[in-house]
Image: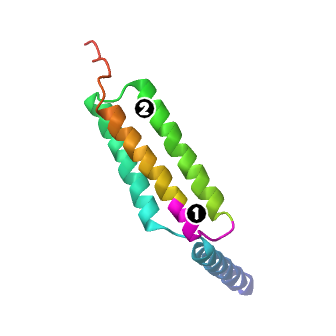
Amino acid sequence: MKTTISLLLASLALIAGQAYAEQGARQHRPRDPGVNQRQHNQQHRIKQGVHSGQLTKEETRDLRSEQKAIRQEERAYKADGKLTKEERKDLHQDMNDLSKDIYQEKHDADVRPKAVK
């Protein structure tokens, strides 16, 4: 009986310790809801362009590659636990450029060929 109670208490302590550690890790990770929301919106715009046929496969691949580079840059900026004003400004400028690229690619004459049924 003592062993069971000791094992139960040890398990609870371990779970509580993990939850505390995860909470601490979240608190030290810089957050930027503006950057995250813009990334989500741009991803949605790309998906919409694919579904509507406005984006070709090559255009989609290039836009997603650009998006991936911005996410990698964001991770690199946040790796030290801080996102400076200059880093945030740079991320937003990169997302401005991507936004213009999405618009241009969706509104050019290139269209995805329709699938043959």
**Foreground: 117 or 1?**
117
Label 2 vs label 1, nearer the camera: 1
- Residue stretch in magenta: 80-89
In this view, the residue farthest toward the top is: 116
To which residue does mark 2 refer? Answer: 60
To which residue does mark 1 refer? Answer: 87
Assess disc 1: are there few (<14), some (14-19) or many (≥20) residues with their C-alpha within 10 Å of its C-alpha: some
Left or right of residue 62, residue 75 in this image: right
Q: What's the residue type where badge 2 is placed?
A: Thr
Horizontal and vertical percent position of residue 106: 31, 34
Query: Toward which corner of the image does residue 18 lie, by quadrant?
Result: bottom right
**Foreground: 8 or 97?**
97
Helix, strand or loop at mark 1: helix
Residue at figure coordinates x 62%, y 78% from the top left: 24
Left or right of residue 69, residue 93 in this image: left
Residue at figure coordinates x 67%, y 63% from the top left: 79
